[in-house]
Amino acid sequence: MTAPAAIKGSEHDRAFLKPRIFIPFIIITLIWGSTWIVIRDQLGPVPPTWSVTYRYIIACVAMFAYAIAKRVPLGVGREGHLLAIGFGFPQFFLNFNFVYAAEHYITSGVVAVVFALLLVPNSALAWAFLKHPLTRRFVVGSGVAIAGVGLLFLNELREAIVAPEAVLIGIGLTLLGVLSASVSNVMQGMRALRERPIVAMLAWGMFYGTIANAVFGWAVYGPPVIEYRLGYWLGLVYLGLFASALAFTFYFGILREVGPGRAAYSSLIVPIIAMAFSTALEDYRWSRLAVAGCLLALAGLYIALRSRPEVSATTQS
């Protein structure tokens, strides 16, 4: 299905730099840069799937309450519910279960760095299925940024104190999370989703993701497990309200405006922010390799986001 107007790479670039896009982009990167430490604190007596379930119960209630308060119609029809399942299952069930499981094997910093590779499948799938163009400068800048992330990854591996087998398992789980998130991200470019209100679709997507988490959690781990520690529940509220309900509302809006490739730049900045939080809260020590990686990633961002117009292409769903 072809969109009514052609989308040019330059249009995506100009849209990205508009305050209504760039400000929410900064907000979500700051929020998601902090979540890795919070998720780490969630690992304990509560099985990860149940923690994800509690998180999305909070987020789901918040989204439905917001939709009702704003009088956003929640009736999305049969096709809308199928679409909500289509992006909600990989994003809010598969992705987060893989990420939470990965943090049992590797540090939150390594998970954040590996997740920065989201840019690659997002850009590739958007080019293959949505016909989003890839400008040469965008590709070059992305390559430079990924090289910077590679240095950060190398630095984290050097600092890792776990067995190599555990590192490989953790990286593998994180990559599965990346692919799951990417499928959901690219779906936001479909016209059938773009024509529906973000708030309503996000509420239903979270609803179906929550159901999937609860069913899987009960089947694998048994009845819900509760931790009564205050810090655990404060973390859940933060992850549910800010890192999920607020951040995904902003992020899906950005996805629809600038496309999955450019939106995924949040995942390149997040590990840098995560390391900054780790510096303040976990006494993280910056090496020359880590500094070089950060600078290279930021330089790549600058190059890619200044990409010039090339041949336009139609957008498909």
Image (cartoon, rainbow, N blue to C red):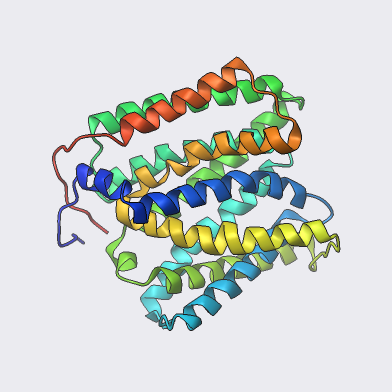
Residue at 75 percent of width and 52 percent of height: 42
Q: How many marks?
A: 0
Between 282 and 87, the residue placed more toward the observer is: 282
**Residue 86 in picture, x, y percent from top left:** 44, 63
Horizontal side of residue 40 vs 20, given as left or right: right
Horizontal side of residue 291 vs 104, given as left or right: left
Horizontal side of residue 85 vs 56, given as left or right: left
* Residue 83 visible in rendering: yes
Q: Where 195 falls versus 164 (above or below)?
A: below
**Residue 102 in picture, x, y percent from top left:** 67, 42
Instruction: For the C terminus, give its image quadrant.
Output: bottom left
Instruction: For the N terminus, give its image quadrant.
Output: bottom left
**Residue 135 in picture, x, y percent from top left:** 23, 34
Q: Where 100 falls versus 72 (above or below)?
A: above
**Residue 309 in picture, x, y percent from top left:** 17, 38
Between 312 and 93, the residue placed more toward the observer is: 312
Q: Where 184 falls versus 84 (above or below)?
A: above
Residue at 25 percent of width and 34 percent of height: 307
Q: Quadrant of residue 310?
A: top left
Between 304 and 106, the residue placed more toward the observer is: 304
Q: Quadrant of residue 171?
A: top right
Residue at 58 percent of width and 73 percent of height: 62
Between 150 and 246, the residue placed more toward the observer is: 246
* Residue 46 visible in rendering: no
Q: Where 63 falls versus 19 (above or below)?
A: below
